[in-house]
Image: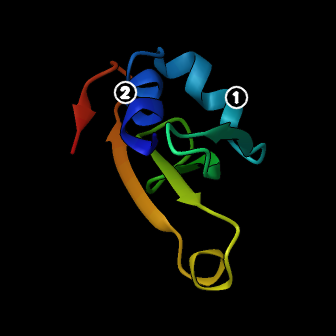
Amino acid sequence: MLDARLAELKAKPYAELKALLNNPDCFEGTDASGQIYQIEWEAFWESAPEGNLKIIASIDDGKLLSNIVPVTLAYVVTPEGKILE
């Protein structure tokens, strides 16, 4: 589920991803087994405003350990739209 959400985010243009700055978003979904997960994603400036954006997405299943240490994936996108892994 996290990989699918990250792929959706990677398809978005830089200008749209900037809307995630100081405005994280989340989604709750259910996998094939019926387990409910929450995925949260947000953006940060990698170093300077109007430069590269770091996009971070994390997933947890609501259990104590995954709430404390969720699985997290990230990538960087340049103002030109190039994705850096």
Does residue 71 lie above or below 76 as drawn? below
Name the quadrant of the C terminus. Answer: top left
Position in image of residue 9 (x %, y %):
47, 27
In depth, the one of 76 and 50 nearer the eye is: 76
- The residue shown at (40%, 31%) is 4
Camera-nearest residue between 56 and 64: 64
Q: Amino acid at mark 1?
A: Ala
Q: Which x, y percent locates residue 20?
A: 68, 36
- The x, y position of residue 56, in whole percent, is 49, 52
Is 85 displayed left or right of 58 in the figure? left
Apparent side of residue 28 relative to residue 4 in the rendered image (left or right): right
Instruction: Please determine whether, in this image, residue 24 is positioned above or below residue 61.
Output: above
Q: Is residue 20 left or right of residue 5?
A: right
Q: Secondary structure at mark 2?
A: helix
The type of residue carrying mark 2 is Ala
Mark 2 and mark 1 in contact? Answer it, CB < 8 Å.
no
Determine whether the residue tagged by mark 1 lies in a helix, strand or loop: helix
Residue at 63% from the left image edge and 51% from the top image edge: 37
Q: Is residue 17 above or below residue 73?
A: above
Residue at far front of view:
33
Please tell me how crowded label 1 is: few (under 14), some (14-19), or many (20+) other residues with Cα within 10 Å.
Answer: few
How is colour applied across the structure in the image?
Answer: rainbow
Judging by the rendered image, the residue that carries numbered circle 2 is: 7
Pair 2/1: label in front: 2
Residue at image point 44% right, 62% down: 72
Label for residue 19? Answer: 1
Indicate the position of residue 2 as horizontal and vertical percent values: 44, 44
Classify mark 2: residues with Cα within 10 Å, few (<14), some (14-19) or many (20+).
Answer: few
Nearer-N-terminus badge (2/1): 2
In which quadrant of the rendered view does residue 62 lie? bottom right
